[in-house]
Image: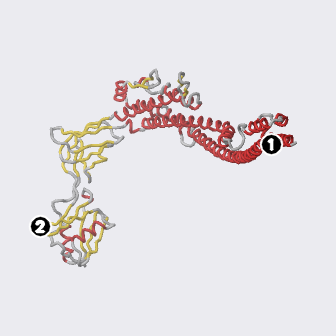
Amino acid sequence: MTTSSTSSTSSSLSSLLSSLTGSSSGTSSSSSSSSSSSSTSSSGTGQSILSAAGIGSGLDVSSIVSALVAARQAAPQQSITNQTTALNNQLNGLTQLNTALSSLQSALSALTTTSTYQSYNATLASTSGGSSIGTATTMSSAQPGTYTVAVSQLATAQSRTSSAVTTGTAVGAGNLTIAVGSSTMTIAVSATNTLSDIAAAINSSSSNPGVNATIVNGVNGQQLILTSQKTGTANAFTVSADSTSSSGLQSLATQLNTAGSNEAQNAELTLNGIAITSASNSVSGALDGVTLNLTSTGTNQLTVSQDTSAASSAIQAFVTAYNSYVSTASSLTSYDSTTNTAGLLLGNSTMTQVQNQINQVLSGSVKGNSIGTLANLGITRQADGTLSIDTDTLNSALSTNPSAVQNLFSSTTGYATTLNNALNVFTTSGSGIIPSQITSINSQLTQLQTEQTALTARMAVYQQQLQTQYTNLDTLMSSLNSTSSYLTTALAQLNDSSSSKS
């Protein structure tokens, strides 16, 4: 009777364990446990059930959650990543193109500037082996020619010196007036003011008409020197003291108002025998477009000739900028069949439009121009699309017909004008095709960043939900596992008790 009761109890416990763990173990052990009459068999069945894999706290919750989050995030993340990469590639390509075109337009700007073609050199050289009388500079209004310039007198600034007084001696009170032309300055001198005080007052006065005051400390004491700030007789000064001034101040005014050896004078010269005077040694206006900077007297020959180097440099700069554009365009539209790598703007409609516009302008001619085409100027297109210059042909055209070269580029139908106008459609800030597209792309990238932020936030919430669910599941399974362990121990003890009684 005892053995039968023990077997029945063992069978019931086995059934309970089976119902607690059977769904996770994947085994069907309930019926075999209940039909077994052997206590050893019952014990073995319980151990098999409780050792099934995946039960309790052994779950890797972190890996499970990460995998589920990654699976849900994969599709939208891939879409955002692909769009962002494509837009960044397009943005990079358009930026490179815009930079190349802007550089080309900078070169075109020089070719449409009048001074590029109307540049002149002016030189002064002695005709008798003497020294140069100075230098000459030109403006675009100059004209080629040769002239004889004879300088008999240079312009000088007026300078006068007072008598010496003991350092620190007061001059005397009163009002000292200094005038240059119609401009005057009156200095109020106190009874204690020295020459140094008067000099400082002159130099700091807001109404100074154009004189500088300097103190020289010589062996006989201090002396005040007044000097006109500009050369020429029109810039000479006068000095006076009013009737209320002290005798000392009136004496100082008389000394500074008395002509000496350093009086103001104008520059005097002749140009091809025509007399010219100038208050300054920088003589402009005497010869249209030419300024003479005189440094000494004498006779020189002035030669004014056209300088073609500016135009030549501008044309060379255009070719260099164009070739840089060609290199950029070639890279942007390339395709490497070996690596299956395409240029950033391969097949891009804007890139195609730019190339067509430039080719159309440069392959045409300028009607009514004696040179007509770039090729006739020595600029030809090579097999790789770049331009090259025949410097001999270019220099010959610049020397013999500079106005035609200017017209070829800068007239309303010239190459530089026409090409620049065509490129403005693409590059003008704000309204140009390329800047507008760049703005649009940046807007799309900003929207994608917003979508990325939202996706990241959603995935964080989803991850937290999964973490909570699987943590709760793991806690439950751990609890069940503890219960299973307890029951296993109880079953083992019951089996041992049954065996000992039998």
Q: Is residue 31 left or right of residue 110?
A: right
Image quadrant where one finds the N terminus: top right
Residue 501 circle label = 1
Quarter of image, res 380: top left
Q: Position of residue 280 (x, y in %)?
A: 26, 52
Seen from this angle, which residue lies furthest left? Answer: 219
Front one among 240 and 293: 293
Quarter of image, res 307: top left
The kind of residue tagged 2 is: Val
> Which is more N-terminal, label 1 or label 2?
2
Q: Position of residue 359 (x, y in %)?
A: 51, 26
Circle 2 residue = 219
Name the secondary structure under disc 2: loop
Count up the numbered dots. 2
Kindly identify the residue that appears in the image at 39 percent across and 39 percent down: 115
Front one among 72 and 433: 72
Please rate how many residues cluster around mark 2, counting C-alpha atoms within 10 Å: few if below 14, some from 14 to 19, many from 20.
few
Disc 2 to disc 1, C-alpha distance: 143 Å
Residue 141 circle label = none
Please rate how many residues cluster around mark 1, counting C-alpha atoms within 10 Å: few if below 14, some from 14 to 19, many from 20.
few
Image vertical order of residue 168 relative to residue 486, above or below: below
